[in-house]
Image (spheres, helix red, strand yellow):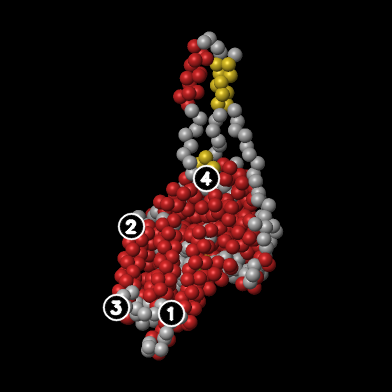
Amino acid sequence: MSFWAPFLLLHLGGPDTITAYSLEDNELWLRHLAELGFQSGVAVYILLLSLPGSSDHLPLLSISIYLAGFIKCFERVQALRLANTENLRESMLGSPDPGPNYPKFMEEFRLRKSQGFSVRVEEVPETSYPVIHHAYPAGRGKVISEAYDLFQTFKRIFVDLILTFEDRDASQAYFHDLEYGEAFTTIEIELGFAYDMLYTKAYVVYTFIGAFLRLTSVLLVLMVLAGFCFLCDTNHYRGIDIVITYILISTSLMMEIFAVFTLLRSDWTDHWLSQHNYTRNMLIFPSLKKQTKRRWSGSIAQLDLMSVALEEKPASLLHIQKLFGIDKYRVKHRYRTYSNVSDNLKSLIYKQFLEFMKVNSDAIALCSHKGSFSLRENKCDTLLWSISEVEFDQSILIWHIATTLCYYSDLDSDEDHTDINVCRVESKHVSEYLLHLLVAYPVMLPIGIGMIRYRDTCADAMRFFKDKGPINGKVEACEKLLLVDCTEVLPHEVKGDRSKSALFDGCRLASSLKKMKSEDMWKIMSQVWIEMLAYAATHCRGFHHEQQLRKGGEFLTHVWLLMAHLGITEQFQVYQGHARARLNVS
């Protein structure tokens, strides 16, 4: 039993692929350090008790397992410490920059002036350095290494640090030559590195010391297996104890072998090979490398308010759910569906961002628009009330209802590959995605009373459908809503401000949109939704983007990082270098 005790320490070290279950674990690294001290102390105490009077090699083998277990636990605590927000921010700050010596400059200025010279201060423009791209060998490793280099710069936005104009220029120069698919693939790889940084042992294992410790732990486990097989006399032990011991050793060895395989298959290994001009085929086991790697689900959650209001999915065992108090919580999950992030959506987003940058010298302006820019560009100033005069969460609800009404009243457009249908389908997807975020993850959106507005709107819609009698499906429901005249007397004039329902504001918007040509309507709607998606992405703090990585990641985070790479972020707060003023004495 004293031989088994260190195995518990070995398993407490955990696998390489996970150290933290949430960001709070990283903040509590000191607590984990104290736990490591206590656990290793107990293991040492058990070892010391087993030493006196022992006549076989088990105590020596126990020491080997103890060392391997201590290494694993140390790696885990060190990974938690390095992923701590304060430590990450400190490691990214760099050296302090006091700038040019102002007092010394002014002393020389006054001295020259007192000597009778005519002194003028001239600004010397700082030399712009050319953007350097590393010449990595072509292939999968090249893309990963370029994404890694970008991540080393842009990881600062995860901890709310600022970026410089050099960072912006280098990133824009790189993304300028990419297609939308390549751009989003680069983002996926970067977010993979971000996940590894925050939730795994990557920052410990993928170093020279980490590789040495990993090799040491594997050798120690192999030594224990060989020692127990050939050096220990197992005749005076019970058969069940011997079986348990072999299971413990073999399980530990399999974990170590699996960790090595995981290391060889990782993007970190591809980056190292690319840096050293190696290719994937130079690995000892090239078959371990996947040609394609799925880095995230590639889907977005959907929530349709109309489905909830029509109660299309009635709850099963409702009385049991109420007994445990999970009935309202289950509604979010019962009506949640998923749709794939299509190439069409990626293309629409990427194209709109690039076009916005062409017509605007200030790319950061997109961070402050919630859809108003697209409406003004398309000369739809009469619709600005749905964006500029209401809060963002209310805009989501209004445009979600309008999109749903227009979608189900325009079902004749069934050609999957036409531009109009692409805008129509993707508008609905983004609409339902943002509504899902509003209900499920409101912390990722700007502060507001979105949940109150959502509940009031649902209640208003349920009452309307109940009053109109039995309704068969969403098409009929949308037709009845569109029959309500919301133009002569505005909804807020009747409802006042106590109820936050946005139902009939959405109907009013849908009526205005349906007066346009179908092609223009869906084009404008898709542009507005992408602009609202961009606004939500830039107004979500890096901390909340980090939190979602442990759940597989949100598409909003992909959009946020893409915008940062294109220079569309408020975190570019260093726009130029030092003034480099000089004295012109004459």
**x and y percent of residue 134 in the render?**
65, 51
**x and y percent of residue 241 in the render?**
38, 86
State how far apart marks 1 and 2 are (Cα). Answer: 64 Å
Q: Earlier in the sequence, mark 1 or mark 4?
A: 4
Tag 4 near tag 2, CB within 8 Å: no
Per the image, label 4 sits on a secondary structure element best described as strand
Q: Nearer the viewer, residue 71 or 35?
A: 71
Q: Mark 3 highlights which residue?
A: 323
Q: Quadrant of the N terminus?
A: bottom left
Answer whether residue 303 is visible to the viewer in this image: no
Amino acid carrying mark 2 in the image: Arg
State how far apart marks 4 and 2 are (Cα). Answer: 43 Å
Q: Quadrant of the C terminus?
A: top right
What label sits on residue 248 in the rendered view? Answer: 1
Q: Earlier in the sequence, mark 1 or mark 2?
A: 1
Q: Nearer the viewer, residue 211 or 293?
A: 211
In this view, 523 is above or below 262 = above
Q: Mark 4 highlights which residue?
A: 163
Q: Earlier in the sequence, mark 4 or mark 2?
A: 4
Q: Residue at x 41, y 77 (%)?
A: 57
State how far apart marks 3 and 1 are (Cα). Answer: 43 Å
Amino acid carrying mark 1 in the image: Leu
Per the image, label 3 sits on a secondary structure element best described as helix
Label 2 CA crowd tier, 10 Å (few <14, some 14–19, many 20+): few
Q: Residue at x 43, y 79 (%)?
A: 248
Label 1 CA crowd tier, 10 Å (few <14, some 14–19, many 20+): some
Q: Earlier in the sequence, mark 3 or mark 1?
A: 1
Amino acid carrying mark 4 in the image: Leu
Amino acid carrying mark 3 in the image: Leu
Quarter of the view holding residue 168:
top right
